[in-house]
């Protein structure tokens, strides 16, 4: 599932491709992927300029000239591709937004969605999300304050979108590895020094994920060499049974709160 770095990467690349461009056509192939009648969706979105593209947690917001917002959550299996009809992947397309001869294809939206909301509705839909961990106002003191109110396993807390938005299975594993802390550790057993270390690891890993285009390797457009570059930099995620790059111990997979969790039993304590 795309997480904060993937969505930040999508945002940055799409701003270059479709920022200030007009949506010339809308095609809905699966009505369950949108939230209103398809004819109303099309009439509201078609011929609108993309004023801005923003990210909130694991969501993208396409802000339209008519002050409506397209709120995207790719969820598990969802991804996007931008290009011509000849370049598009041989996959089922749920929604297509056209920009002349080029199109933004939304693929794998079986669980995900592209919903249309006005400004107030958008604010309401995102109101339960916690702070953005890479924003400048999310300081170490703010993090210490928030984590000081939490109990239970670290992994579960990092996945809680009301605690901090945008972190999922991949980056929670990588953050814990970088900090040298077991994802199964109880927060009450993590001292102040290691909580600060956790904050620093969070900043480093998320920024590194953005820098290398996230871990999901489907290119956004033909010739896209950035997207998915972080996949080869993962130290523990999806590497069960392989040797730890730091110490040589075998990477372990464990289930915590019904989620697969990866860690090094030697490097992480």
Image (cartoon, helix red, strand yellow):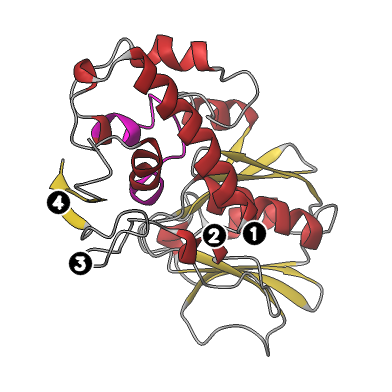
Nearest the eye: 13 or 103: 13
Disc 3 to disc 2, C-alpha distance:
47 Å
Read off the residue under disc 1.
42
Residue 167 drawn in magenta: yes
Mark closer to the chain start, 2 or 4: 2
Q: CA distance from mark 2 to mark 4?
A: 43 Å
Q: Is residue 49 above or below residue 231?
A: above
* Residue 250 picture quarter: bottom left
Label 2: few (<14), some or many (≥20) within 10 Å? some
Side of 249 where 56 appears, left or right: right
Q: Which mark is residue 254?
A: 4
User: What x and y, as percent, mark residue 74?
Assistant: 46, 56
**Structural distance between the alpha carbons of marks 2 and 1:** 6 Å
Provide the residue designation for mark 2.
38
Where residue 238 appears, as percent x and y from the top left, is 30, 62
User: The C terminus is located in which quarter?
Assistant: top left
Q: Earlier in the sequence, mark 3 or mark 4?
A: 3
């Amino acid at each position: 599932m795309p997480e904060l770095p993937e969505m930040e990467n999508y945002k940055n690349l799409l701003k270059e491709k479709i920022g200030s461009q007009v949506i010339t056509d809308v095609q809905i192939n699966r009505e369950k992927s949108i939230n209103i009648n398809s004819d109303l969706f099309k009439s509201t979105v078609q011929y609108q300029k993309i004023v801005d593209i923003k990210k909130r947690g694991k969501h993208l917001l396409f802000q339209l000239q008519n002050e409506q917002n397209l709120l995207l959550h790719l969820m598990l299996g969802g991804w996007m591709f931008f290009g011509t009809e000849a370049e598009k992947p041989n996959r089922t397309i749920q929604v297509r937004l056209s920009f002349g001869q080029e199109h933004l294809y939304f693929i794998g939206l079986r669980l995900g969605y592209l919903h249309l909301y006005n400004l107030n509705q958008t604010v309401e839909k995102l109101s339960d999300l916690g702070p953005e961990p890479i924003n400048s106002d999310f300081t170490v003191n703010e993090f210490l304050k928030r984590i000081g109110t939490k109990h239970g396993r670290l992994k579960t807390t990092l996945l809680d979108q009301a605690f901090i938005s945008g972190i999922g299975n991949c980056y929670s594993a990588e953050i814990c590895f970088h900090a040298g802390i077991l994802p199964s550790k109880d927060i009450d057993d993590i001292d102040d020094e290691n909580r600060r270390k956790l904050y620093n690891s969070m900043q480093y890993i998320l920024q590194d994920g953005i820098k290398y285009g996230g871990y999901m390797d489907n290119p956004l457009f033909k010739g896209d060499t950035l997207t998915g570059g972080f996949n080869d930099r993962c130290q523990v995620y999806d590497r069960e049974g392989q040797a730890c790059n730091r110490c040589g111990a075998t990477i372990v997979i464990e289930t915590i709160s019904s989620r697969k969790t990866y860690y090094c039993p030697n490097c992480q304590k």
